[in-house]
Amino acid sequence: MDDTELTQLDPSYTTVMRIEGLLATLPFVIGAAVLSIAEVVPAWVPGVPVLILAIILIGILPLKRYRTRGYDMSSDRLRVVKGVLFHSDTVVPFSRVQHLDVEQGPLERMFGIARLILHTAGTHNSSVTLPGLRHEIATTMREDIRQHVKRESM
Amino acid sequence: MSEVEVASAGEEIEVGEWRRVSGLSIVVQGVRTLGSAIIPAAFILFGAASSEDMLGKVAPYAIPILLFIIVVNIVPAWLTWYRLRYKIGANDVRLEQGILSRSARSVPYDRIQDVSLEQKLIPRLLGLVEVKFETGAGGKDELKLSYVSEDEGERLREVVRELVEGADEAAMAPAALEQGEKPQAVAKDTASTLLFDMPPKRLFTFGMFSFSLVIFAVIMGVAQQFEMFLPWGIEDLVDRVVEDEQIREATGYFSSLGFAAKVMAVIYALVTIIVVGVASGVAKTFVRDWEFRLERTGKGFRRRRGLLTKTDVVMPVHRVQALVVSTGWLRRRFGWHGLSFISLAQDSGKANHDVAPFAKMHEIAPIAQEAGFSLPDGDEEWRRPSSAFYFDRGLIQALFVAVIGIAVLTIAAVEASGMVPGLFVIGGIVLAIIAFIAARQYYLWHYDRHALDPAQILSRRGWLAPRTQIANRVKLHSVEIEQGPLGRWHGYCDLVFGMAGGSFAFRGLSVDNAKQLRAAVLDSIASVDFANLPR
């Protein structure tokens, strides 16, 4: 299953990450504005790092993240791939899933996407999150996987 | 709660009745809090009395104050005892507690991993035990009953264990029927065979290898804690020794000695440290592992140990997730190894259960076999991690040391304002450390290896004290390939397994190797359903 093509996430996930990036830069924008108005340093100085931060968080990172993320669902296991700098490629067999969550934040609900979370009994990877799925797809996947969830006995 | 009959401890345990823990637990609780309250109070009274000639004024209050402290401690202890009750129900164990705000906890039997008994010093003197119902949640969320009498603890354990087995079988039955098999008859928990024990002689040998200087830290810590009550402070003493003639005298005396005498003095100091270290190692080992016994009972492994704090732990065989065979750099030369199990339940805060802390390999092998694992026998196809991984790691560590070394050298050169012989010593030390790092990484690359056999994954890591870890393939929960920026550049990655109760990873594999291993392990996980596993 390592060679099969990964399924891409929903494109609106990029938009959600962009808005999150925007929200993350807001405090820095305010801080920079305060510094500029207080005239502690020349007015343009705080603007430069904030601009760079904004370009990275809003412009570059969401797209890169979206491109590196993906999943592959086969008949008995789910593979989740992610990571821009640190790659991670996790496979969870359905028979080892303890329980499942489909979560949606307010931003995600606006764009109709959701996160599918698989919980396992392992200490490492006790929960594997797959974000940026269309809500309907996430619930269908949850139902499919739930068929396989067996009683925990280990 | 008042309208419900609460059976007092000591009677036969009946399913579904509310019970209280032993009344003597009030004494234990009282003694414990009294100890922490009376000693400072005594010191304060003593301090007040000795500061001036106030003994006459303080004395009349001493008795009432002490009585007050006793009442303040005993009443809540009694209330806590009175308001605590538990029930061994048909499907779960329930515990209700709390003086004003009540909490009720229920643990279903199919979530109980095992029932362990623990006896600390004071409860032991009173013949009490603490019963812990391990759920794998670890730490705070465990349900414990402190304290019940020894007999009661033993009975509770038997009753709960039978009920737990009942719950397991009930859940097993449908799955087994699907397979067209009869549910396996579980052997009654009567016969037990001794797998491993440590007589005093073995304990002594174990202690000899457990060199520990912790006693020095303890003495210093205690001295610092009670410094205010000592006639002189530790720091004062150190200052005085340094400032006074004492140290000058000592150094003068030292330099007046001949070369041979100096050597003798240094050897004497070293021997003292070694003797103290070995002696405290022996003492620690005796206290922890006194009367160590590992038995195989009908349902699992039972381990008892302890001199002051006695513990009695039972681990069901099917809950053992992995084995760890570890050793030390010195004891390995004499063929001593330690075996521990990784399981969901915790062993007094540690994730690993020691089952044979100090044994020869021929003693460890049968225990491993009982747990359903086989030790590596040479048939496995051992593989080595990627050499680039060790090169990168060595390079990073060497760079780190080099940066610090250069900084120290620069500072020293500025301080000494010029080149002095001392600088060459520092430079030499830095180079030696870097050479050591390089040698270590080379040897690690040479020694570290991992393998896959039909049922298990195995890894051996470490140079002087190698650690072998063996896990059952079907008991893994997920497999992940992790790759950092350096790994992507040089083509290596980590293969991390999701294991219940512990961690298992192959670090620094080539990507192809990792993908192969993952595919193989996943196939064996996915083909076996938990419900169909032999239990």
Image (cartoon, coloured by chain):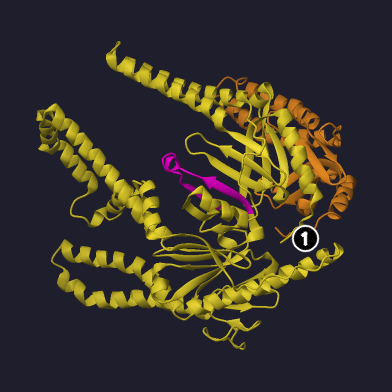
Q: Residue furthest top?
A: B418
- Vertically, is B158 above or below B359? below
Residue pictured at 19% horizontal, 51% vertical: B232
Q: Is residue B326 magenta?
A: yes
Residue pictured at 67% horizontal, 74% vertical: B163
Q: How many marks?
A: 1
Callout 1: SS: loop
The quadrant of the rendering that contains the C terminus of chain B is bottom right
The quadrant of the rendering that contains the N terminus of chain B is bottom right
Which is more toward the observer, B25 or B471? Answer: B471
Residue B238, position as x, y percentages in the image: 21, 42
Rendered hue of chain B is: yellow
- Report the span colored magenta: B321-340
Residue B144, position as x, y percentages in the image: 55, 69
Residue B399, position as x, y percentages in the image: 50, 21
Q: Image quarter for residue A44?
A: top right
The chain to which mark 1 is attached is: A
Mark 1 — residue? A151
* Residue B94 visible to the viewer: no
- A13 relative to B498 in the view: left or right: right
- B84 relative to B223 in the view: left or right: right
Rendered hue of chain A is: orange
* Residue B253 visible to the viewer: yes
- B129 relative to B208 in the view: left or right: right
Residue type highlighted by circle 1: Arg
Residue B410, position as x, y percentages in the image: 37, 16
